[in-house]
């Protein structure tokens, strides 16, 4: 929440120049032409039409320098901040507008999500664009930490910058002001946690609906998902092929890889291969010969258990041997390619091994396929293979190892920098844990009254915080925070066609923390009972 108000400088760069070495090389080539051409008349005539080599000059574009001597740099920064914040701000609240985004590929997108809109803003003026990037960074950080509240964070950032620029222009010290802002926000976070209450199961749908643009169909679906998988479960989202939203709860691990050959099917009506109490052979390389599988397959035939082979690939000769034995009835077997590619494929195989209690066969650890026996096999209560998917249901014997693995992956998520990498790690948790999660922010830290009313009431706590600050300029920073906290509610009211200042005064006229303005119905009421709630985080 804290922002630093300072001028922006850029580093200039000089164009590359042609070096003396290049010039001398060109001169040497030219002189060599002269010496060769003097050797014969015929060659001299040919060379007379040749041009001497041209030296090229590459120029790097110089960067402009902006100094804040007359306040122009900060003004341009603020213009960029306002352009982005005004665009994102129109989506705030239940009566916020949608934004149409041009898409490079396909049809335009209609969205009302703050962080999505912010990512699309790219301004022509370089200094204005830096201002837009500052606010975009606040939205992205909020999205990473809490998964929601991006529009509110943009509006708050705009408020802090707008109010801060005013006092800096009047001659205040920006460093001391920033220090006051940071101390005030830290104290307000503690106050916010004190105002928070633990979320009840019945309130999960309200939290999810607000995050989904007041879509209670989606909110109820998310709440149902969490009730099925638990509050620490993991929820995954996929683009559906129909117009309706649907919820699927998968038991065990599921991934998008089906059987290699349809000859492995055990139910011809459903076109699936299904086995109970199945053993799993996990191979982190290509299987080229069926001879390497003899020891494992003979044990499966002898003891009569079904076996599922998951490998990088299976060549035709080895696959044909497996299919023939399956069709003859001597083997209960199925095979598929391991999910993922490269390093991610190896990680998925390790996840499956932990889920089933097996060992991955890979040459790097000195374990070869021809030396493998039944001791390396994993065990699943049930496996189901379709054309495009596979489900593995654990027997529960390795639950402690699974929980340890999930904890390891969560640690990787914390240090991952790319959103794509975080998404893939969350997918791995979802597959291991066998479930789904989305409103973790509310579950982790509770809920507060929404609609911008909690932020407005926090402003009344600032005066007491000011008494703990060291000097007057730090107190000015606290006042900046106090004024900025009213921005979200005023904008929600404005988007609903109501005067924000009037709404703020009416909300503060009562000490009831649950009382506030419901922009959806244009009424003042108990917002907690009305389901207007936000995650504390």
Image (cartoon, rainbow, N blue to C red):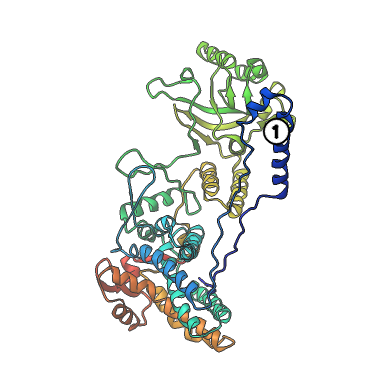
Can residue 353 be spotted in the picture?
no
Image spot of residue 305 (x, y percent)? 57, 22
Identify the residue at image location x=36%, y=56%. Answer: 212
> Which residue position holds label 1?
33
Q: Is residue 453 above or below residue 59?
A: below
Name the secondary structure under disc 1: helix
Image spot of residue 106 (x, y percent)? 35, 42
Image spot of residue 181 (x, y percent)? 53, 78
Q: Nearer the viewer, residue 532 or 268?
A: 532
Residue 450 shown left or right of residue 389 in the figure: left
Q: Nearer the viewer, residue 358 or 461?
A: 461
Q: Which residue sits furthest front?
A: 41
How crowded pointer 1 is (Cα within 10 Å; few <14, some 14-19, many 20+) is rated as some
Quadrant position of residue 530: bottom left
Image spot of residue 452 (x, y percent)? 38, 71
Identify the residue at image location x=31%, y=55%. Answer: 216
Q: Is residue 436 above or below residue 145?
A: above
Identify the residue at image location x=58%, y=88%. Answer: 471
Q: Is residue 70 above or below residue 263?
A: below
Q: Is residue 510 above or below residue 66?
A: below
């Amino acid at each position: 929440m804290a922002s630093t108000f300072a001028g922006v400088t850029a580093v200039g760069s000089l164009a590359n120049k042609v070096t003396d070495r290049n010039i001398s090389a060109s001169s040497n080539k030219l002189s060599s032409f002269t010496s060769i051409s003097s050797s014969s008349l015929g060659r001299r005539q040919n060379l007379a039409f040749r041009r001497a080599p041209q030296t090229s000059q590459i120029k790097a574009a110089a960067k402009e320098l902006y100094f804040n001597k007359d306040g122009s740099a900060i003004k341009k920064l603020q213009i960029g901040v306002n352009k982005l914040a005004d665009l994102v701000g129109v989506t705030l609240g239940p009566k916020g507008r949608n934004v149409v985004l041009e898409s490079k590929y396909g049809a335009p997108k209609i969205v009302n999500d703050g962080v999505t809109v912010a990512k699309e803003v790219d301004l022509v003026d370089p200094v204005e664009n830096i201002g837009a990037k500052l606010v975009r960074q606040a939205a992205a950080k909020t999205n990473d930490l809490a998964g929601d509240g991006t529009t509110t964070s943009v509006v708050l950032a705009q408020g802090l910058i707008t109010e801060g620029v005013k006092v800096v222009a009047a001659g205040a010290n920006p460093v001391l002001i920033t220090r006051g802002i940071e101390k005030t926000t830290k104290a307000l976070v503690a106050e916010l946690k004190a105002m928070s209450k633990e979320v009840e199961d019945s309130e999960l749908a309200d939290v999810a609906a607000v995050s989904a643009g007041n879509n209670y169909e989606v909110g109820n679906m998310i709440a149902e998902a969490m009730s099925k998988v638990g509050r620490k479960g993991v929820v995954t989202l996929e683009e559906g092929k129909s117009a309706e939203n649907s919820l699927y709860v998968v038991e065990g691990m599921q991934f998008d890889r089906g059987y290699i050959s349809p000859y492995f099917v055990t139910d011809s009506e459903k076109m699936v291969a299904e086995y109970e109490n199945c053993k799993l052979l996990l191979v982190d390389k290509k299987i080229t010969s069926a001879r390497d599988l003899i020891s494992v397959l003979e044990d499966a035939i002898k003891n009569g258990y079904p076996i599922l082979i998951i490998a990088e690939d299976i060549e035709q000769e080895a696959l044909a041997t497996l299919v023939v034995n399956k069709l003859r009835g001597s083997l209960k077997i199925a095979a598929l390619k391991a999910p993922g590619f490269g390093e991610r494929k190896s990680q998925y195989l390790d996840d499956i091994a932990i889920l089933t209690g097996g060992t991955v066969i890979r040459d790097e650890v000195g374990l070869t396929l021809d030396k493998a026996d039944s001791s390396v096999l994993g065990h699943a209560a049930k496996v189901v293979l379709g054309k495009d998917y596979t489900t593995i249901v654990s027997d529960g014997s390795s639950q402690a190892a699974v929980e340890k693995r999930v904890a390891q992956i969560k640690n990787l998520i914390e240090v991952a920098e790319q959103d794509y990498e975080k998404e893939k790690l969350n997918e791995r948790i979802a597959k291991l844990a066998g479930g789904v999660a989305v409103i973790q922010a509310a579950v982790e830290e509770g809920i507060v009254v929404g609609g911008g009313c909690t932020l407005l009431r926090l402003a009344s706590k600032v005066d007491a915080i000011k008494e703990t600050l060291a000097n007057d300029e730090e107190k000015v920073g606290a006042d900046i925070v106090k004024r900025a906290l009213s921005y979200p509610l005023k904008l929600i009211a404005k988007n609903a066609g109501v005067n924000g200042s009037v709404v703020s005064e009416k909300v503060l006229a009562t000490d009831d923390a649950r009382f506030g303005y419901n922009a959806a119905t244009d009424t003042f009421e108990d917002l907690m009972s009305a389901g207007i709630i936000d995650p504390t985080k």
